[in-house]
Amino acid sequence: MTQESEIAQKGAAPKQPPKQENMGLLMVKMLLKKPSMLIKLRRMGPDEERYIAPPRSYELPEYRKGMKYSTSKEPFVRATRWCNPREPLVVALAHELGAYELSDREFAEAAYWWMKTKMWYAVNGFDGPSATLKRGSGMCFHFINTYIALCRCAGIKCRYKGYQMKLLEMEREVFTDVDPGFASVWDAAGSTVGEAEAELYIDGTWITAYLAQTVALTGATGWPICEFGESSLGTYFEAIPGSINRFESIPFGLGLSLKISNLLAPATMERMNVRMVRVQKLGLQEIEDAGGISGYNKAAKKRREVFSADELLDQAALKHYDKIMVKKPESLKD
C-alpha cells in the first residue's frame, strides 16, 4: 500500500495547508442566511426514528491512590488542552491495560485495540478523555485524544497528525444526507473533512496509530481494519496536498467547532447517530460472519490488493444500502 512519505512526494505541495472553513462557524453563517433551516437542524420530527445510545461495553476501572503516572513537563508528554493524562479515570485505565508493566510498544498496542474494540462511534460535542470513557462513545478526535492521554500517562511521547481529505461519494451520502441543511454546509465547505491519526515516539521512531474508526465502523465498509502501526493514508484516504499537519495540542478552533455544531444542530447529530448505529451493527455482523477480526482482516486485505478503497465502499453500499439509508420522513423533504 502507498506509504505517507510517497503521498507527500506526489506533485508540488503548497507551502501552506489549504485554508478550511471552521464547520461550526460556517454553520452559523448558513443559518444567518436561511434562519428557517434552524428548525430542521434542531428539532426531530414526530415521524423520525430516535437515537438510543448503546450501553457502554466495559466497566469503569477504579482509581487507587498511589497509581503511577507521568509527571513530565516535556512536550508531547505533558497535559495539553482537552488532554489531561493525569485524570484519575485515565490513570486507572492505563494501569488496567498494563502501564509501567508492559514495554512501551506492548502497552501502546494494548491500548490501541482496547479503544478500537470497546468504543462506539457517535457524534458528540467535544470533551476530554474522562468524559469519553464514561460515555463509551465519540468521534475520531474523541478516540485519538483519549488514546493519547492514556499513552502520555504511561510516559510515551504522543502527537496528533491531522490532514484534510475529500469525502468519498458514498461517505458523503452517509454522513451529509441526513437532512438538507447539513448537506448544504458540507457543500459550502467544499466537501472536505478533517481526519487525524496519533503518532507515538517509541524506540527512537514515530509510530502511527489510526483510531478514528471503531472496528465496527470499518467492518461495514469492507475495508481492512488498520492495525497498530498502519496509516489511514493510502489504505482508505489520500490527503489534500499540503494539508498534513502535526501538533501537540488540539487546536482551540477545532474543539470549538465541534461544540458549536452540536449546540446548533442537535437534531442533525441525532439523525447521524441513528445512521451510525445501523452502520456499526452491520459492521459487527460482517466481522462475526468472518470468524472475528483476524478472519475479517485477512479477507479484507486480500480485497484491498485488488480493489481501491472507493470500489470496496461501493461494493459494501450495494450490499447494505437499504439497511443504512432509511427513507426520509416527510418532515425532512425539501
Image: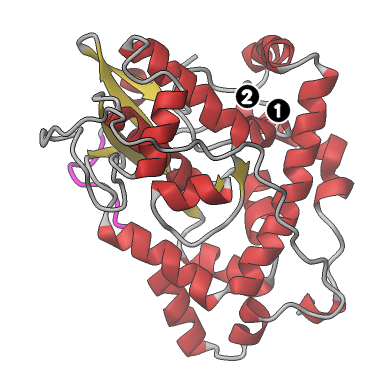
Q: Position of residue 183 (x, y in %)?
A: 61, 66
- Three-letter code, disc 2: Ser
Mark 1 nearby-residue class (10 Å; few <14, some 14–19, many ≥20): some
Question: What SS does tag 2 mark?
Answer: loop
In the displayed structure image, the side of residue 194 where residue 297 appears, left or right: right
Q: In terms of depth relative to the viewer, which is nearer, 287 or 326? A: 287
Q: Nearer the viewer, residue 189 or 44?
A: 44
Q: Which residues are magenta?
A: 13-22
Q: Residues within 10 Å of mark 2 (few under 14, many from 20)?
A: some
- Residue 172 lies, in percent from the top left, at 62, 52
What residue is at 61 percent from the left and 52 percent from the top?
122
Q: Between marks 2 and 1, how big is the CA–CA gap?
A: 6 Å
Drawn side of residue 276 relative to residue 166, left or right: right
- Residue 137, horizontal then vertical, whole percent: 58, 47
**SS assignment at label 1:** helix
* Residue for point 61% across, 29% down: 117
The answer to whether residue 283 is visible is: yes
| Residue corresponding to mark 1 | 312
For residue 267, side relative to residue 253 (left or right): right
Q: Is residue 207 highlighted in magenta? A: no
Asked whether the viewer can see residue 20, the reply is no
Label pair 2/1, CB-CB below 8 angstroms = yes
Which residue is under mark 2?
A: 308
